[in-house]
Image: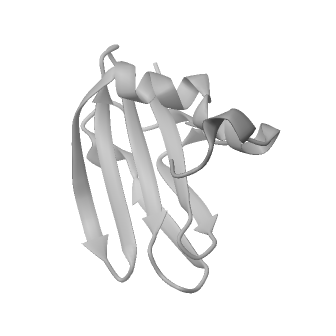
């Protein structure tokens, strides 16, 4: 963060203090890059709680791109997952993949929980 922390606007403060994103740092392990190509980068991490993982998608291109990642690849024993967008603080629903349409140099961060 290269700005003056005493003069943050509400949007920037909400971004930097998002409790669900902070939880990724506090409650995950084994973070690793699993894909890097075509200006698309994917990182995954395992949650400390059973059946939880995190997926981050990065568009490093100068153009909008759609990124997808199959959730069976996160190493959880399930075929479908509850997906939550952590930046938007929004439940996405049940899926077998994460998908985001990302503007240039944008990212998305998801919590995925194995469905029972």
Q: Residue at x 24, y 55 (%)?
A: 33
* Image position of 26 (left or right of 75): right
**Badge count:** 0
- Give x and y (percent) for residue 26: 37, 20
**30 shown above or below 64:** above
Q: Using the image as rendered, state which of residue 94 and residue 18 is in the foreground.
A: 18
Q: Residue at x 53, y 58 (%)?
A: 107
Determine which quarter of the picture holds residue 42. Answer: bottom left
- Give x and y (percent) for residue 86: 59, 36
Whether residue 92 is visible here, answered yes or no, is no
**27 shown above or below 70:** above
Q: Residue at x 24, y 37 (%)?
A: 75
Q: Colour scheme used in the picture? A: one colour
**6 shown above or below 47:** below
* Image position of 113 (left or right of 29): right
Q: Residue at x 58, y 86 (%)?
A: 63
Determine which quarter of the picture holds residue 100. Answer: bottom right
* Image position of 88 (left or right of 40): right
- Give x and y (percent) for residue 105: 53, 71
* Image position of 36 (left or right of 60): left
Q: Using the image as rendered, state which of residue 2 and residue 115 is in the foreground.
A: 2
- Give x and y (percent) for residue 40: 39, 72
């Amino acid at each position: 963060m290269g700005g003056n922390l005493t003069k943050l606007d509400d949007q920037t403060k909400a971004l930097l203090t998002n409790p669900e994103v902070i939880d990724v740092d506090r409650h995950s392990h084994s973070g690793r890059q699993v894909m890097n190509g075509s200006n698309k980068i994917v990182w995954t991490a395992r949650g400390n709680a059973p059946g939880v993982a995190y997926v981050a998608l990065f568009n490093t291109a100068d153009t909008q791109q759609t990124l997808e990642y199959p959730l069976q690849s996160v190493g959880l024993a399930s075929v479908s997952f509850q997906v939550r967008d952590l930046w938007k603080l929004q439940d996405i629903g049940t899926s077998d993949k994460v998908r985001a349409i990302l503007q240039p140099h944008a990212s998305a961060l998801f919590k995925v929980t194995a469905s029972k």
